[in-house]
């Protein structure tokens, strides 16, 4: 009799949900997939059936905004915190402190660097709400913003040396095709790492950076056939991730946010402003005037200039403003000819910002002889595509309005129906209406 009553109860609930046109809610899984360095205009010509399907069935914008500097390290911390660089503190890999001493935001390991991030991460918040989280990082330094993630995989240790050492090579043994193949293979190796973790762990939230497009964009340029091939290959790899999660969790609904950390500029590798082998951190024209300084590139099309002597600010500004590779100069110093302030760019984290922020002219490569760079606040570097696939939460064909990389973390809170004051304090906004 007891078992009969249980069966009857189950049938009654099933009939109730059917009568209401509803079904019992399922706990969603969410995957944030980043296509590193993706230009939205390339999607118009690329064959991307997986992304096209996600766009048709979900929400999309080709004009989400990356934060400054438009570089991987900075935007990944923005993805996970919902703050600009002047709040989360990761303004680049290296900087000068107020005593003009060199410091690193990666110090000395990524786990150590995570403790320096002064704001909560979405990994911590999700963990506090019982979610099992993981991040899979192509380059490694994406992990700086991953404090609280239960699984953290990324960087050189994941890839065979014969893959890792050639990630910025144009040819391998004289073959451009082989160099391109190995870069695209890096995405598959990272997805293999995800697959191996799924064999041992149950996960509720996954973030993964498919970085082959960035390496290929730097080496061959974002307007090259190789870059187009990389975007199309990445689309197939995203399809593999979607299929993998569906097979591993056959009864679970998975939501997807697909975005990018920055766009890309086509640059001129034949004109290198400050070559690596000629002291890339020094500007000869400043050295000639005995102005002690240090320059750090921020993605290749932006650079932060630190001066040792605050009395030389005006002299330094007027010395560099006419250099052919300098396009715009931002500073918080009261100089009339400046393009704007560091506060306008949201890069002035206390104790870590330089005197000048330089946006370079794309007809030059700053330090590295590459056909592609990023980091600037030009539209081509700032605007990136953003997709949201969440059936029953986002209507098919929805156009996302006024989105930025700040909005990823708050949107995750919405997808999981989490009400948490730490999410409410983020500078980004949830994108679900």
Image (cartoon, rainbow, N blue to C red):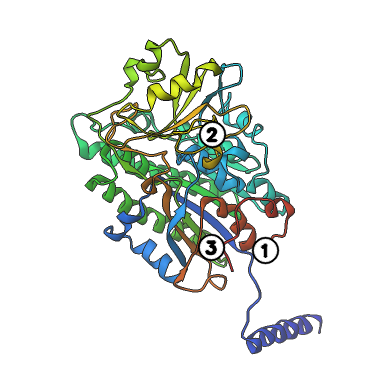
Residue at image location 51% in from the left, 41% down from the top:
345
What mark, if any, has residue 417 been given in the picture?
1
Labels 2 & 1 near each other (Cβ < 8 A): no
Residue at image location 68% in from the left, 46% down from the top:
124
Q: Badge 1, how many Cα within 10 Å: few under 14, some, many 20+? A: few
Q: CA distance from mark 3 to mark 1?
A: 13 Å
Mark 2 vs 1, N-terminal side: 2
The x, y position of residue 303, in whole percent, is: 43, 30
Q: Where the N terminus falls, by quadrant?
A: bottom right
Q: CA distance from mark 3 to mark 2?
A: 30 Å
Asked if residue 14 lies left or right of residue 344, the reply is right
Q: Badge 2 is on which residue?
A: 91
Q: Badge 3 is on which residue?
A: 255
Question: Considering depth in this image, is 234 or 46 the residue closer to the camera?
Answer: 46
Q: Badge 3, how many Cα within 10 Å: few under 14, some, many 20+? A: many
> What secondary structure is marked by label 3?
strand
**Relative to 109, residue 391 above or below:** below
The x, y position of residue 244, in whole percent, is: 46, 57
> What secondary structure is marked by label 2?
loop
Mark 3 vs 2, N-terminal side: 2
């Amino acid at each position: 009799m007891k078992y009969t009553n249980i069966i009857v109860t189950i049938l009654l609930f099933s009939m109730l949900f059917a009568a209401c046109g509803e079904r019992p809610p399922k706990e969603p899984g969410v995957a944030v997939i980043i296509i590193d360095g993706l230009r939205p205009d390339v999607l118009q010509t690329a064959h991307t059936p997986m992304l096209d399907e996600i766009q048709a069935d979900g929400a999309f914008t080709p004009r989400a905004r990356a934060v400054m500097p438009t570089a991987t390290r900075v935007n990944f911390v923005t993805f996970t915190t919902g703050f600009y660089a002047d709040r989360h503190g990761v303004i680049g890999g290296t900087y000068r402190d107020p005593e003009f001493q060199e410091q690193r935001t990666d110090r000395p390991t990524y786990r150590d660097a995570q403790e320096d991030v002064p704001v909560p991460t979405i990994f911590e918040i999700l963990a506090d709400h019982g979610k099992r989280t993981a991040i899979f990082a192509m380059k490694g330094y994406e992990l700086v913003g991953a404090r609280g993630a239960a699984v953290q995989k990324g960087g050189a240790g994941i890839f065979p040396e014969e893959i890792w050492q050639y990630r910025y090579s144009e040819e391998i043994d004289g073959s451009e095709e082989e160099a391109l193949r190995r870069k695209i293979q890096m995405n598959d190796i990272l997805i293999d790492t995800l697959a191996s973790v799924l064999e041992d762990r149950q996960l509720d939230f996954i973030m993964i950076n498919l970085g082959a497009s960035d390496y290929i964009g730097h080496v061959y340029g974002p307007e090259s056939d190789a870059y187009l091939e990389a975007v199309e290959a990445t689309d197939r790899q995203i399809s593999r991730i979607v299929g993998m999660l569906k097979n591993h969790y056959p009864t679970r609904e998975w939501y997807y946010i697909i975005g990018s950390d920055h766009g890309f500029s086509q640059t001129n590798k034949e004109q290198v402003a400050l070559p690596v082998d000629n002291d890339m951190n020094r500007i000869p024209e400043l050295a000639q005037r005995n102005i002690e300084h240090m320059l750090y590139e921020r993605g290749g099309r932006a650079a932060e200039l630190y001066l040792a002597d605050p009395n030389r600010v005006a002299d330094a500004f007027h010395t560099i403003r006419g250099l052919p590779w300098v396009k715009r100069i931002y500073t918080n110093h009261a100089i009339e000819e400046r393009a704007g302030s560091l506060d306008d760019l949201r890069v002035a984290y206390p104790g870590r910002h330089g005197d000048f922020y330089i946006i370079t002219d794309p007809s030059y490569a700053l330090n590295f002889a590459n056909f592609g760079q990023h980091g600037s606040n030009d539209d081509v570097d700032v605007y990136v595509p953003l997709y949201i696939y969440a059936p029953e939460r986002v209507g098919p064909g929805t156009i996302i309005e006024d989105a930025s990389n700040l909005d990823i973390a708050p949107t995750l809170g919405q997808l999981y129906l989490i009400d948490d004051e730490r999410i409410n304090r983020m500078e980004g906004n949830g994108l679900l209406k």
